[in-house]
Image (spheres, rainbow, N blue to C red):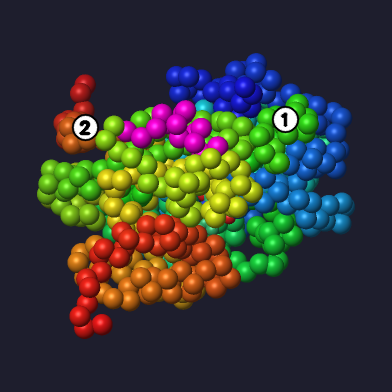
Amino acid sequence: MLTEQERERIREEAGHYDYAQAACVEALKIVQEGHRWVSDEHLKEVAELLGMSPEALDSVATFYNLIFRQPVGENVILLCDSVSCWIMGYEDIRAHLKERLGVELGETTADGKFTLLPMACLGTCDRAPAMMVGGDLHRNLDNGKVDEILGRYRQPPET
Amino acid sequence: MDRPLTGDLRSDGGVLDLAAYEKVGGYEALHKVVREMTPADVLKEVTDSRLRGRGGAGFPTGQKWSFVPMGDDAPKPKFLIANADEMEPGTFKDRMILEGNPHLLIEGMILSAYTIQATNGYIFLRWAYKVAAERITRALAEAYDKGYLGKNILGSDYSFELHLHTSAGRYMCGEETGLLNALEGKRANPRAKPPFPQVSGLWGKPTIVQNVETLCNVPPILRHGAQWYLGLSRSEDGGTKIYGVSGKVRRPGAWEMPLGTTMREILERRARGMREGHSFRGVLPGGASTDFLVEAHLDTKMDYGSVQAAGSRLGTGLMIVLDDKTSVVGMVLNLERFFAQESCGWCTPCRDGLPWTARILQGLLEGRGRPGDLERLEMQTRMMGPGNTFCALAPGAMEPLQSALKYFREDFEKLIPKSDAA
Ligand SMILES: Cc1cc2nc3c(=O)[nH]c(=O)nc-3n(C[C@H](O)[C@H](O)[C@H](O)COP(=O)(O)O)c2cc1C
Ligand code: SF4
Ligand code: FES
């Protein structure tokens, strides 16, 4: 079930438009903020709030690379696999990430910390290779830098 | 040298807030326009400036605006949308302005909206630009507080509401009509044209969709005039352009320079040439969906007409360099995989042809090349050529492939075993 607060935020987003459906991507992102991914259950609830059929909403949800219809880990790693990053060493970084995390592209680590996904150009091609982790951008990657970044997410936050 | 788009950016990568933007002349154009210019006056100035779209297709901006129905009988509301989806691989120019000077875009949007008398606008931003999203949100609030946005702007009878929409990642959302569907909360399949969005766009109302960089040219044009703007350029079209280079050059980056600067000057003077141990083989001049050019073209001016005459397109103006250590076939495979993945699947040549193309290229690289593969690839470039698909994604996808087959044919041929059976 969505929380009352989430439902309220979705209603508010819908109120910005003459047609509530226009808020559907925003609504799905609100769901993901709290739950990381969009379950069938949540999809139905959002569809009802926006006056859409679940099928119509799902056809939009599945169109987007960043609306997750399957569970993802605590931190989603989006590794740019487009042309400039490919030229600058994407394949090495990918191999290193796979080895360090023990997963293939599209998989989540056993401890649920990371999901590794390929992503189209992140718009920072002059500082390739690049990836985003949990919304933060990291560029000019090499293996050492990747280890350092992963380490930061693995440690409990300092107090 | 005048750099109206990026000359005021902070060197520390920070953002110009409202006060800092006003200090360098920001919103002067808006004051002037609401005080003394009619929409028709603004349209004339922008048309005379010979500003053309910076999003890839290069359509003359003033002409595009002239198709919007005007007057009291025109349908309402009208919309103005900034296309900030920037997902063309190799392209990172709009990010600079969105992060560094969001008020320039906002002022450009208010002025453009005024010209077509649009009352509502959206900034359609790609999900990945998190920093930009925060800074735009703050800038919008500042602009509303100061009376630059909202009802009766600067005491005039003109009103404009502007909102930020962040997308969820899909290349097709950047295609003009796909973007309209995305904003309406539908799948971002493209729409049939006509009707053109200028007449029937968002929710069936007149709508202009314009690239971020295009819109950012509007305040300086109105502040300094069309003649000044034409004088910035080394080309028949007006203004500066944000050029950029990625790949194995010494100093990748993006720089605002006169429109019509040569490729050589950008590559050698700004990007400082190739990295040690690498030599130049070719370049995609304006993003992933443009034709390769080679050494012989390096003195080509990077403007709309010259790049086209050389056999490619200016596109987004951001170059991707191919070096001698990088596999041409591998690079083209990477590009075609991107397009295959991002295809919306609406029409058959693109939905089926792009994965097929990628499979042939992959086969070549994995030692499964067969006689006839190059002909099969060439057939795809014809099947997905201009006019055979619903939108420009597929023809764009064919540009690097067809030109690679032309300029680097031996790289492909090498991968096909001499067959005794053939
Ligand atoms: C598949 C596809 C993706 C596109 N993505 C973008 C984009 O991210 N940003 C953009 O400004 N234009 C993009 N365009 C071009 C737009 O359709 C449109 O021509 C442009 O936004 C018009 O603005 P302009 O005249 O200011 O260039 C794309 C086109 C296609 C076919
Ligand atoms: S060309 Fe490709 S992306 Fe464009 S409408 Fe057809 S299937 Fe969709
Ligand atoms: S190609 Fe990776 S950021 Fe553009």
Amino acid identity at mark 2: Lys
Dot 2 corresponds to which residue?
A145
Tag 2–tag 1 contact (CB < 8 Å): no
Left or right, B112 with reference to B312: right
If the image is split into quadrants, where does the C terminus of chain B sit?
bottom left
Query: Where is residue B95 drawn, in percent x and y?
Result: 49, 36
What SS does tag 1 mark?
Answer: helix
The residue at label 1 has a CB less than 8 Å from ligand 1: no
Magenta stretch encompasses residue B53: no
Q: Residue at x 51, y 32 (%)?
A: B265
For mark 2, give the secondary structure. Answer: helix
Judged left or right of residue B27, residue A101 is: left
Q: Position of residue A12 (x, y in %)?
A: 54, 47
**Residue furthest bottom in the image:** B421
C-alpha gap between disc 2 and disc 1: 46 Å
Q: Residue at x 47, y 22 (%)?
A: B14
Which residue bears the numbered disc 1? Answer: B231
Q: Position of residue A54 (x, y in %)?
A: 43, 68
Numbered disc 1: what chain?
B
Residue B36 visible somewhere in the drawing: yes
Q: Which span of residues is magenta-colored?
A: B262-275
- Local packing at callout 2 (Cα closer than 10 Å; few below 14, some 14-19, many 20+) is few
Pick the front one: B7 or B185:
B7
Establish if A63 lies above or below B256: below
